[in-house]
Image: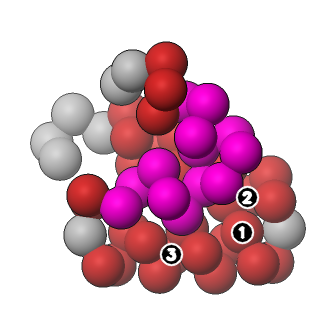
Amino acid sequence: MSIWRVILAIVFPPLSVIDKGCGSILIVLILTLLGWIPGVIAALIILNNPKN
């Protein structure tokens, strides 16, 4: 996880998980629309997952 991805996850979470698949983008987008902090947390969790 690079520092640029972390910054992007804080500024605009759905854009930071663009290469992780459609499901990840939708989850982060919905959580970001419900509240900015849940979207950031979900994006950081998805980016920190070593399997992807």
Q: CA distance from mark 3 to mark 1?
A: 9 Å
Q: Principal SS element in the magenta part?
A: helix
The amino acid marked with disc number 2 is Pro
Which secondary structure lies at badge 2? helix
> Residue at label 3?
27
Camera-nearest residue between 22 and 46:
22
Asked if marks 2 and 1 touch (Cβ < 8 Å), the reply is yes
User: Does residue 14 show up magenta in the picture?
Assistant: yes
Mark drawn on residue 38: 2
Looking at marks 2 and 3 on the same chain, the residue that comes earlier in the sequence is marked by 3
Q: Are marks 3 and 1 in contact (CB under 8 Å)?
A: no
Q: Disc 2 vs disc 3: Cβ atoms closer than 8 Å?
A: no
Identity of the amino acid at label 1? Thr
Circle nearer the N terminus (3, 1): 3
Q: Is residue 31 magenta?
A: no
Picture quarter with the N terminus:
top left
The answer to whether residue 19 is left or right of residue 17 is left
Which residue in the structure is indicated by mark 1? 32
Q: Is residue 25 visible?
A: yes
Mark sitting on residue 17 = none
Q: Looking at the rendering, which quadrant does residue 42 occupy?
A: bottom right
Residue 42 visible at all: no
- Residue 14 picture quarter: bottom right
Distance in Å between CA atoms under marks 2 and 3? 10 Å
Specify the segment rendered in magenta: 6-18
Picture residue at 50% right of the left edge, 59% below the top:
15
Q: Mark 3 belongs to which amino acid?
A: Ile
As helix, strand or loop, the secondary structure at mark 1 comes to: helix
Left or right: residue 35 versus residue 19 is: right
Q: Quadrant of residue 18?
A: bottom left
